[in-house]
Amino acid sequence: MAKIIEGERIGKTAPLKVGCAAAIFDESHKKLLLTRRTDNGQWCLPGGGMEPGESAAEACEREVLEETGLHVTADTPHRYLYVSAPNHIERMPDIFAEQTAAFIR
């Protein structure tokens, strides 16, 4: 269920959008795939927001494909993020993708 949040960057009110992120490792589990954000140049896990009617796993698979070109199959959520706002706490899953066929350096 969408909630209302407040903040300077997004204006006085905005709907909260549930998102996901994928931790994608190489076969040796020593390298982690990161993407560079276009808005601030920081490195992050590939991921993004869910579209209407999309499951968290579907959103994660789509976001990874859009951001990296990799086709992955999302595993079950391995942990949940709890995000607090002035009047509520949201529980959001982090989806982790299974091993991929290719790894981008």
Image (cartoon, rainbow, N blue to C red):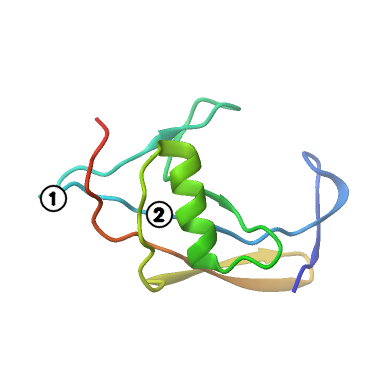
Percent across and percent down for residue 75 are: 35, 69
Residue sitting at 74 percent across and 74 percent down? 1
Percent across and percent down for residue 103 are: 23, 39
Outermost residue toward the right in this view: 12
Q: Which residue is mark 2?
A: 22
In the image, residue 93 sits, relative to residue 6, either above or below, namely: below
**Secondary-structure class at tag 1:** loop
Q: Nearer the viewer, residue 97 or 4?
A: 97
Residue sitting at 41 percent across and 37 percent down? 68
Circle 2 residues within 10 Å: few <14, some 14–19, many ≥20: many
Percent across and percent down for residue 60 are: 48, 57
Percent across and percent down for residue 70 are: 36, 43
Q: For the residue marked with disc 1, what is the amino acid?
A: Glu
Question: Is the C terminus in the top left, top right, bottom left or bottom right quadrant?
Answer: top left
Quadrant hosting residue 91: bottom right
Circle 1 residues within 10 Å: few <14, some 14–19, many ≥20: few
Left or right: residue 91 compared with residue 104: right
In the image, residue 4 sits, relative to residue 65, either above or below, namely: below
Residue sitting at 71 percent across and 63 percent down? 52
Quadrant hosting residue 51: bottom right
Q: Which residue is mark 1?
A: 27
